[in-house]
Each structure stands twice: as C-alpha cells, then as structure tokens.
Image: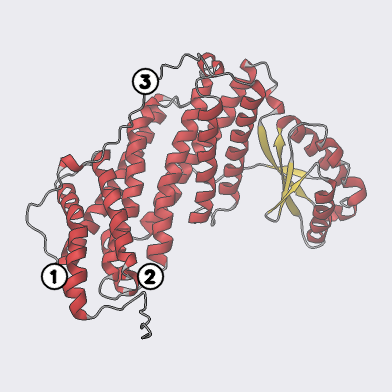
C-alpha cells in the first residue's frame, strides 16, 4: 500500500492564485460594503441607525475574511485590512452614539433642560466627527481597491431591502403574574453596587489620569456598568418600588448613558491602541492618518467628551440614591459612599505604627458596609486586621522619607469616625478631593 503524502493545512498563494482566486472572492465580499459607502457619501448628516448597523455587520465580516487569508501579514493587502478596521471601530463608536442620541430623551436623567440640550449638542458634534472619518476612510478604501484591480460600478447602491431590522419582536406578555415579587434588601444591595462603581470610577479618573485612556481600563468600567444594567433589569424593573419611586428609573437612565458613552470610548481606545500605535509609520498608518487628520483627536474625544460626561452622570448617582434611601426610610449615611483624602505628616512617624493604628479595624467593623484605605495604588480593607497589618508598615516606610497621602473610602457614617480617628492618632490633615477632569 502506497504511503499518502501529507498535505499542509496552509498554502501560500502565488500571484496567479491571488489574481484568479483571492481577488474575485474579495470583490464579492466587498460588494455590499461598497454600496453602503456610496450611500454614506451622499449624506452630510449622520446616517440612520439601520444603515450604521448594516455597515457594522459588513465591516465585521470582511475583517474576518481578510484575517483568514492572512491580510494582516501581507504588504499589498494590509492597508485595506486596516481601513476596514478603521471603518468598523469608528462605526461602532457612531452606532452607540446614534443609539444614545435617539434614546436619551426617554431616560429619566437628573439634569436641567439646559444641561440636557448641551449634552445632545456635544454628542451630535462628536457623531459628525466619527461620521466624517468613516466617509474619508471609505473613499480611500474605494481608491485603494481600484489600485489593485477591484473596481466598483458607478452609482452602485446598497439596497434598503437588505437593511437588517433593529426592532426585536416578542410574544404577547399575557401571563398574569402581576408585578414581580421583590426583596428590599436585594434592591438596596444593587443600589450599593451602583454607588461603589460610581465612586470607584470617580476615584480612578481623578487619580490615574494617564491610565484612563487605555482600552483595558475603559473595558473594566464598561463591564461594571453593563453588569449594573443587567442587575437592575433583573431585580428592580417592574417592581412596586420602581412604580412608586420615580428615582429608580433615574438610576436606570444614568447607568444606561454611562454604559453607552463607555462603549464609544472603548471603540476609539481599541482602534488607537491596535491600529494607530501598533502600526506607527507603516504604509497603512499613513493612509489611516490622512483620513483621521490628527491622531490626537481620538484621545481628545475620549478625554474631553466621553470620560467627563461619564464622570458627570456617575457623580449624580449619590444624589439620586440619597433621595431613594430617604423614601424607603433608610438612613442615607449608612449606604452613601464617600472618599476622603488624608495627609499624614512625616514627623508623626512614631505615632503611626501597629499598636495605636490597629484599633481602626474595630471602628470599621461597627458598620455593615466595608471601608477601604488606598495607598500607593493598593487597596486595603479597613475591617481586616491582616490587611491593615500589611498596610501600616508600608505607610511607615514611606513616612521615613516624606509626608504620605492616603485615601479613605466607605459609607459616610463610618468614614466620619475613621477620619477623626486618624486625625487624633497621627495628626492626619484632610485635603480636598478635587477632580480636574470636566466637560470642556
């Protein structure tokens, strides 16, 4: 019996195969995208969500197609692959913004009419920016494809019959169960999670300015707000609490706005990290930069528009929750989260050691919610004696050289007592917690 030759699963195409096999497949894959680009070129205002959704679907499929053929490793096709990526991520930014622009009037936001109109105006201005970039990349893509032999028919359009419907159809909700049964403690737990996420986000943005432009950081908080939205819809939506206390819907609105803004920020941060920084000074880089103009505009959009508005809406969370706690006859100071900044003078080094400072754990344990101490980007649980036994020597070591700044975070009632403890035991001086990030 003859031994069969083993055949490699991957074969590098020669020029003939690229021309006769790959290019026809690529042309076919690009056909719908070309039609959408033609439609977009006719419009000066952002497109309807349906067209943006269709573009998202096509760009995703083409990028996958190109990656399967190894276009990201080929000098000739790499620029096309990067242009598709540019269209995909800027369109994701656009789609999320269009959805927010359409839906924001239905959210019960705790803002004035003037603030609402300003936000809509700022949002629209940034949608125009994203849309212009997509059109420029689309135009350059058409020219790039023509240069390698893929020509488009003039006037080719994308049929509106192919628009995917955004409307979701469901069965009639005729199961007679009345309002969902709810537990007050579960609802309070979700509000506490919301307050914790808002405070952690505020703290991160104000104290780690250089890190919040990174996709990894944005994704962390996007995910947390996504989880909050899911928890709300599972345990609070359609409960008697939501029906009777209007502020619950405001919580839902603020979560949703923050989530969509972070989705937009993630899209830009991803594109910047993977398709600008990673390919700097390549042929694909220069072609993309021609479409974007100034690459700093991407970072500026995140830093001056998206993140400041998430910060603004998340800071409103404390006000909304305070009203809710009062309406359900709970003391807000037991639940509202606060962060205080303390400066420990280096000359009080001898007062800052295990014996005088460790009783802070007893104070923290008097309260039902956790309190934390932040030092040198590390987080220590104040009610945990083991964690504090690690924190105190670290702080003492720093005090040998200079004054030390620590952050204390927890429920208002606990924080008041803990701050007074540090002032008394080691001469801590309170500083203002001021965030320099704001809507420009």
Relative to 225, say whether 67 is above or below: below
First in residue order: circle 1 vs circle 3: 1
In this rendering, the label closer to the viewer, 1 or 3: 3
Which numbered dot is residue 172? 3
Instruction: Say whether marks 2 and 3 touch (CB < 8 Å).
Output: no
The answer to whether residue 391 is left or right of residue 283 is right
Compared with residue 111, is residue 245 higher up or lower down, i.e. above or below? above
SS class of the residue under badge 2?
A: loop
- Residue at 43%, 25% in the rendered image: 112
Q: Quadrant of residue 201?
A: top right
Q: What x and y, as percent, mark residue 298?
A: 38, 55
Q: Which mark is residue 149?
A: 1
Q: CA distance from mark 1 to mark 2?
A: 25 Å
Badge nearest the viewer, 1 or 2: 1
Residue beneath disc 2: 279
Point out the tag, 2 or 3, that comes first from the N-terminus.
Answer: 3
Image check: 246 left or right of 6? right
């Amino acid at each position: 019996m003859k031994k069969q030759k083993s055949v490699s699963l991957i074969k590098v195409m020669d020029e003939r195969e690229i021309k006769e096999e790959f290019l026809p497949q690529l042309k076919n894959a690009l056909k719908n995208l070309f039609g959408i680009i033609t439609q977009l070129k006719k419009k000066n205002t952002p497109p309807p969500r349906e067209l943006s959704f269709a573009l998202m679907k096509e760009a995703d499929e083409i990028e996958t197609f190109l990656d399967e053929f190894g276009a990201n490793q080929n000098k000739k096709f790499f620029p096309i692959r990067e242009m598709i990526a540019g269209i995909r991520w800027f369109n994701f930014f656009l789609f999320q913004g269009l959805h927010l622009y359409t839906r924001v009037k239905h959210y019960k936001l705790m803002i004035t009419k003037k603030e609402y109109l300003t936000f809509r105006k700022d949002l629209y201005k940034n949608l125009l920016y994203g849309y212009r970039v997509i059109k420029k990349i689309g135009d350059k893509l058409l020219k790039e494809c023509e240069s390698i032999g893929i020509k488009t028919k003039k006037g080719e359009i994308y049929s509106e019959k192919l628009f995917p419907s955004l409307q979701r159809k469901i069965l009639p909700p005729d199961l007679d169960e009345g309002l969902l049964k709810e537990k007050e403690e579960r609802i309070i737990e979700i509000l506490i999670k919301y307050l914790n996420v808002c405070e952690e986000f505020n703290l991160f943005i104000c104290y780690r300015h250089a890190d919040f432009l990174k996709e990894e950081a944005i994704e962390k908080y996007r995910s947390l707000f996504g989880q909050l939205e899911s928890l709300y819809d599972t345990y609070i939506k359609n409960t008697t609490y939501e029906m009777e206390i209007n502020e619950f819907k405001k919580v839902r609105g603020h979560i949703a706005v923050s989530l969509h803004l972070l989705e937009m920020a993630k899209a830009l941060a991803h594109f910047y990290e993977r398709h600008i920084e990673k390919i700097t000074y390549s042929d694909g880089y220069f072609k993309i930069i021609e479409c974007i103009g100034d690459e700093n505009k991407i970072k500026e959009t995140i830093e001056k528009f998206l993140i400041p508005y998430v910060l603004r809406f998340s800071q409103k969370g404390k006000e909304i929750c305070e009203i809710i706690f009062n309406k359900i006859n709970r003391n807000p100071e037991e639940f509202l989260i606060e962060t205080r900044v303390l400066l420990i003078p280096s000359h009080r080094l001898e007062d800052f050691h295990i014996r005088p400072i460790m009783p802070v754990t007893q104070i923290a344990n008097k309260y039902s919610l956790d309190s934390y101490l932040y030092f040198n980007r590390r987080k220590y649980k104040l009610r945990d004696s083991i964690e504090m036994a690690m924190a105190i020597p670290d702080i003492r070591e720093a005090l040998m050289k200079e004054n030390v700044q620590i952050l204390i975070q927890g429920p208002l009632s606990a924080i008041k007592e803990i701050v007074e403890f540090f002032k008394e035991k080691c001469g801590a001086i309170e500083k203002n917690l001021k965030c320099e990030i704001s809507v420009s």
